[in-house]
Image (cartoon, rainbow, N blue to C red):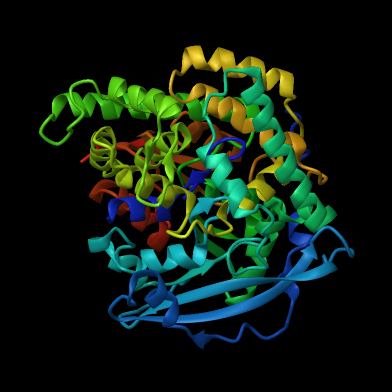
Amino acid sequence: MARTHLRRLPLVGFVAVVLLAAGCTLPVFDREGEGERNSPTASSGAGPTWKPCPEVPRKLVGRGAAGMRYDCATISVPGDWNAGGAAGAGGDKVEIALLRIRSSKQRDRIGSLLVNPGGPGGSGVDSAVYLSFGSAFGGLPDDVTRRFDIVGFDPRGVSRSSPVKCVPDADLDATFGFEPDPESQAEFDELVALNRKIGAGCGEKYGDRLRLFATEQAARDMDAIRTAVGDEKLSYLGYSYGTLLGATYAQLFPRNVRALVLDGAVDPKQDMVAGSESQAKGFERAFTNFANWCRRTPGRCPIAPDARTAVTEAIEKARVSPVRDSKGREATAGWIFYAVISSLYTEAGWEKLAAAIDTLADGNPKGTFELADAYAERDANGGYTNLFDANLAVNCADEDTKVGVDRIRSLQSDWRRKYPLFGAPLATGMLSCEFWPAQRDPYPTGPATGAPPIVVVGTTGDPATPYEQTPKLAEMLDVGVVLTWQGEGHTAYPQTKCITNAVDAYLIDLQAPREDTSCPAR
């Protein structure tokens, strides 16, 4: 599912795609071997206690997948891996929630396949459930579930794993509904004040513990999970932000890697400004692809032939006279903007966006709210999960520097000209970490020396992690092998037979695809 909405947009990965389809100073690289010395591999303690938990898939989708057994466990890890000496035993313990899915058809078991959907803030437990439903439902192929236990985990601070929750629902509503491009100084100052308030509230609740939600800490948790499930080496499937998490793991524990698939690649070396502009460019390109599709297929797009004008006019109208639903909720320019964002994560969302904008013009905001609320993880009563609390905590802990309010204001104007729909919101989104009160703990950005080949997957039409980042991540790792999908939307595996076959051969037989393999859209 998807980096920050309050800063830049979350790199929402696999789970969001499934749901929509279904109805800078660089840190110093860890010295050779230091990661392994802090690994929990030497621990001789018993593994986790697994208990059946069929209620997890039942709560998410109404049932479990046929032939799949669902078991849950938790493990305790150090609150701060960098304290307490080589054992990393410093600070309070953090509880990490795990879900193991095992097929009744499992044969010749290789080990566990650890999965992460992105975010940061996405639940790996939830994503494992969706992945368990097989290729017919957009999940993992049977060839993979027959050879691996599928293990999902909620990273520290996320959902079931010692969750961070410090942003009131009212403030999240205000953030999502806020004017996406506050041109007047008064509006801009109001957005600054909102972000300052959120930062202060989180700092008051968690204090210096906020720095412990950093990506490097979570990557060290992954090695504790590897040990807990009894795997000598890690097999991992990470989407979106999960590629950054996997890349960090590979740098810290290169000799503990069996196979890593990093789909929807993040360039770890880009600073906040470069990353935000990259997303502005990516979403603008994806929206143009949507608008061109509308022009080609007017029978499926009620806002054809000029979808860009239709969306722009809907946002402009909402600034003056927003449509209200039966409960009085207003479809402000902000909510329309996030409906657009939500729909661009998968090509299957294009028809939903066209229909939502069409019915909004008729005074019905239902489709707009459905798209935006799915992205925000907002329920019908206005309650939110902790996706964006965790998203904010992780992103701000990872960031090494601040941009500066004045520079953000300048970039807002500059990017508005370059990326008309998405530039200004991506610029002002950088305000959140300006007021984050905790110390920073940036992740490493170096080669994964000693690791085997790592498959880095990129989609040419990806809005959230634009394709240009794919070769950069592969190059940084030095052992990265690029696999390209000439498709639309965010993340590629297992969208087509070509991509699926290439990734499956790597995960099962450790046959990395030929360098620069490219798969067609269909």
Q: Residue at x 33, y 50 (%)?
A: 20
x then y, percent, for residue 66: 28, 79
x then y, percent, for residue 392: 65, 46
Quarter-of-image position of residue 155: bottom right
Where's the C terminus, which quadrant?
top left
- Work out whether residue 481 or residue 161 is closer to the camera in this orientation and state it: 161
- Work out whether residue 255 or residue 249 is closer to the camera in this orientation and state it: 249
Q: Residue at x 67, y 86 (%)?
A: 46
- Work out whether residue 398 or residue 284 is closer to the camera in this orientation and state it: 284
x then y, percent, for residue 421: 43, 23
Specify whether 411 is left or right of 318. Answer: right
Q: Residue at x 51, y 48 (%)?
A: 453
Is residue 39 shown to the viewer in this render? yes
Is residue 271 shown to the viewer in this render? no
Specify whether 353 is left or right of 123. Answer: left
x then y, percent, for residue 251: 66, 48
Residue most extreme to the right: 85
- Work out whether residue 62 or residue 449 is closer to the camera in this orientation and state it: 62
Quarter-of-image position of residue 129: bottom left
Image: 52 above or below 393? below
